[in-house]
Amino acid sequence: MDCDKVILDPDPQKAALAKELFGIDILPEQCKREVAVPGILTLEQYREIQKTLFYNWEMSKGILPVPGAVDYVRMLMDSGHFIKVITSRTGEALEIAQRLCRQHGLEIFDWQGVGHDVSKKEAAKGLDVYVDDDYDKLEDLIGIVPNLILFAWPANQGITLDPRIIRIEGWENLFQHIA
Ligand SMILES: [Mg+2]
């Protein structure tokens, strides 16, 4: 599974940083690149917010898990599922995500940071299920991972889904679907 907007929700902090760095009012649910850029933020501003937040523990330490993520991921692991996180985060940003999960009582052992705008194909080979909030990442995995799930958020609701990708609302439904 993906990390941001599946396990962790950094959007409230992104919105706060948009105000702090650029004086721009943006709602947390608008803090996805496809929604925020262009119109509310420039791509440079969006990248600056991401960089400032993801590489800085002081800024990141208030990031909360997506509701239900900690309990349901733990329940999946307890019932024998192998959990691997495949994220664009690398280096310190990856370490911060791992630390945040641990801080909230979730210890995941397999993480792979692939880098921004890098395909998750290699990393996802062999998985039965893959969950992401980013439709492009899922589309790229058609034919690689048999079960592809779009984690539902307002930001990804208007998309016409390929029939091989399903959209699931919230961790409780996701758990019931996978378990
Ligand atoms: Mg994500």
Image (cartoon, grey):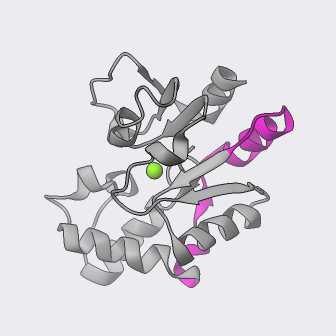
Image spot of residue 160 (x, y percent): 27, 24
89 versus 128 height, above or below: below
* Viewer-closest of 176 and 116: 116
Q: Which residues are magenta?
A: 58-83
Q: Residue at x 47, y 31 (%)?
A: 144
101 versus 144 height, above or below: below
* Viewer-closest of 126 and 98: 126
Which residue is situated farthest in the right direction here? 78
Q: Residue at x 55, y 78 (%)?
A: 92
Specify whether 112 is left or right of 175.
Answer: left
Residue 156 inside the magenta-drawn segment: no
Specify whether 26 is left or right of 7.
Answer: left
Residue 63 inside the magenta-drawn segment: yes
How many numbered marks have been drawn onto this rendered protein structure? Answer: 0
Q: Quadrant where the C terminus lies?
A: top right
Which residue is situated farthest in the top direction here? 163
Q: Dividing the picture into quarters, in which one does residue 174 lie?
A: top right
Q: Is residue 62 visible?
A: no
Image spot of residue 61 (x, y percent): 61, 74
141 versus 161 height, above or below: below
Image spot of residue 132 (x, y percent): 48, 41
Q: Quadrant where the N terminus lies?
A: top right
* Viewer-closest of 125 and 37: 125
Q: Residue at x 32, y 23 (%)?
A: 161
